[in-house]
Image: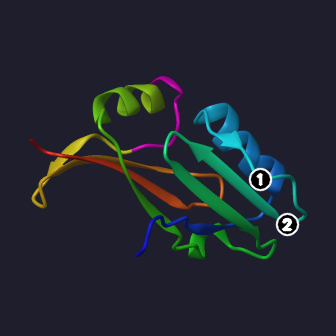
Amino acid sequence: MLTHINPKLPMRNKAATRDFYLKQLGFEQFGGDYEGYLMVQKDNIQIHFFEFAALDPKENYGQVYIRTDDIESWYNFVKDKNLNYNKLEHKPWMQTEFSILDPDNNLLTFGQDIA
């Protein structure tokens, strides 16, 4: 039985990544402090990061789809933080969603089922 999935995304600078996820998005660091590796969590999700100092953000295709049960609150939270986001949209695949980019151009898409 599969129980969870924890994506691993590249990061160039651990301090910058930690700052973005903890201070901007309200995640918490967990599991210890390891050289070249970072783990963050919020509510029921975890995202892991591995150091990739030579990463060119323009060539980074890291992506995560995060489901939420309150898309409008998340959208307003991100908007109020003045983060790099796109507009909230209803998609043909029956999701309401928007996306943001982290400091390394990892794409975080937040989505909620259209009821």
Q: Above or below — where is 47 with respect to 53?
A: above
Q: Residue at x 87, y 53 (%)?
A: 33
Q: SS of the residue at dot 2?
A: loop
| x 75%, y 46%: residue | 18
Residue 105's image quarter?
Answer: bottom right
In the rendered image, the residue lying farthest to the right is 35
Check residue 114 in the rendering and tell me which mark sits there, or answer none: none
Amino acid type, mark 1? Gly
Which mark identifies residue 31?
1
- Which amino acid, by three-letter code, is at mark 2? Gly
Where disc 1 sits, the SS reads loop
Image coordinates of residue 9 in percent, x first then y, are 62, 67
In the image, is 100 to the left or to the right of 17? left
Judge left or right: residue 113 versus residue 50.
left
Rendered view: 19 above or below 23 = below
Circle 2 Cα neighbour tier, 10 Å, few/some/many (<14 / 14–19 / ≥20) = some
Q: Residue furthest top?
A: 80
Considering only order in the chain, which callout, 1 or 2, is on the residue closer to the N terminus? 1
Residue drawn 49% across the image and 46% down it: 44
Question: Which secondary structure class fits the magenta region best?
Answer: loop
Q: Position of residue 52 (x, y in %)?
A: 77, 73
Q: What's the residue at 49%, 67% (across, down)?
A: 5
**Magenta span:** 80-85
Find the distance from the CA under tag 2 to the CA under tag 1.
Answer: 14 Å
Q: Nearer the viewer, residue 21 or 6?
A: 6
Q: Quadrant of the N terminus?
A: bottom left
Measured from the top left, where is residue 106 in percent x and y? Answer: 55, 61
Label drawn at residue 36: 2
Which of these two is toward me, 43 or 97?
43
Q: Where is 64 relative to 79, above or below?
A: below
